[in-house]
Amino acid sequence: MNTLTDRYLAATLRSVPPQRRDEIATELRASIEDMIEDRADGQDGTTAEREVLTELGNPDLLAARYADRRLQLIGPTYYLVWLRLLKLLLSFIPAIVGTVVAIIDVADGNGFGAIGTGIVIALHVTVHIAFWLTLVFALIERSQPTMDLPDWTVDQLPDAPVHRDISLADTIASVVMLALTIGYLPFQHYQSWVRATNGDNIPILDPALWSFWLPALIAVLLASAVFEIVKYRIGRWSWTLFTVKALLNLAFALPVVWLALTDRLLNPALAERLSWLAEADNRNLLGAAIAVGAAVVMVWDLIDTAMKTRRQTA
Amino acid sequence: MVASLVALRRPDYGYALLQRLTGHGFPVDANTLYPLLRRLEDQGLLTSEWNTEESRPRKFYRTSDEGESMLARLLDDLAAVQTSITGLIQGVDR
């Protein structure tokens, strides 16, 4: 006794409540035999049996229908509540736990490795929250009495997203570029890949500039970075912002142009290593090129900004 | 479900009911109908008895009194839907 029908019945009855198993088995077997008999005309029994069982479909599905069992982890009744809670919990708990752990780690004197620990812990917390919350809701889904969920009210509506003309990505890109520029100025002083005959590093920019001009330029760049962040907070261009931007651009470009044209930008020591720079004509040419380049970049940026401002204030 | 309750005013067993319903233009899947009959019985809308006289034991279902009153309500609902739809169709046509 191990026909396909027997196997099908066994598979179906496995998960049907035991007290009704025998009754369902008798009825289902009779039904299957009826169906097979009805089709058996002209073809052999085995083919008919296969067809009938295929038509009845997955035994687990049939058993679930007999037992009135849920075939979803979380059904439509609870799905939205589950999703809302999940988003709410994940929006702050992992970040808080990760930060706290990192801070404690730093306090223990673990230095920068603490950031890695914090991130790992935050990921752990994320997985735990998702798993346990889903488990609880899956259990609620399977307990018969329906919970009294608070009804949705209009107060739950989130704020409509503020329309921004200045994107976060642009702001971050600008700030990063400014930070790299600021970082490069002291960096080239110690590491420029141009070496003197005795192996010492030759800065590209004239070290004499450190007495005033380079700190001033760094201050202007820092102000530009602050400006980018303020601009993002405001969200759109205005003519006031345009004026500040223009002043900042001029404050950076004018000194650079002037220094380049008066041959004070580059380190005179470079000429000792790069013979091309030794000739005054070539130095003037390079200075002029740098000056024109800086001026073009500045003017183009101002025109671009002016167009954006006009579009967004219109 | 309505179709089953109507059809089972005359007692019948699972497969025969399936064929009768299909013959009247209600194609039902066997894996839906059999569990449905069980559930309706649990809810008291159907009564059943085993008939062992034939070649194999068969469970005959019949619509109970409770099933009849439920059926009357469902048919009223259907009639109401039908009326609404008809009204809407005529309203659009005009």
Image (cartoon, rainbow, N blue to C red):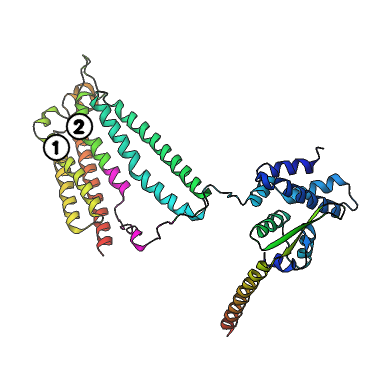
Seen at 78% across and 57% down, the residue is B15
A45 vs B80: above or below: above
Quadrant where the image shows the N terminus of chain A: top right
Give x and y (percent) for residue A258.
Answer: 13, 40
In percent of width and height, residue A23 lies at 73, 49
Chain identity of mark 1: A
| Quadrant holding the C terminus of chain A | bottom left
The residues tagged by marks 1 and 2 sit, at their Cα atoms, a distance apart of: 15 Å
Graded by Cα atoms within 10 Å as few (under 14), some (14 to 19) or many (20 or more), the crowding at tag 2 reads some
Find residue A170 and report its horizontal and vertical position in percent: 30, 47
How many other residues sit within 10 Å of disc 1, few (<14), some (14-19) or many (≥20)? some
Considering the whole magenta stretch, tell me its main secondary structure: loop
Rendered residue at 19%/36% (across/down): A287
Question: At numbered mark 1, what does the secondary structure look like: helix, strand or loop?
Answer: helix
- Residue A295 in the figure: left or right of residue B13: left
Residue at which label 2 appears: A185
Instruction: Residue A212: give x, y in percent of width and height.
Output: 9, 34
Q: Disc 2: which chain? A: A
**Residue A204 in sight here:** no
For discs 1 and 2, the disc positioned in front in the rendered view = 2
Most extreme residue toward the bottom, as rendered? Answer: B94
Q: Is residue A123 left or right of residue A221?
A: right
Which residue type does callout 2 highlight? Leu
Give the residues drawn in magenta, as a range. A148-174
Comparing A218 with B54, the one in front is: B54
> What residue is shown with label 1?
A259
In terms of secondary structure, where does tag 2 sit?
helix
Residue A171 falls inside the magenta stretch: yes
Viewer-proximal residue, A45 or A67?
A67
Image height of A3 relative to A188, above or below:
below
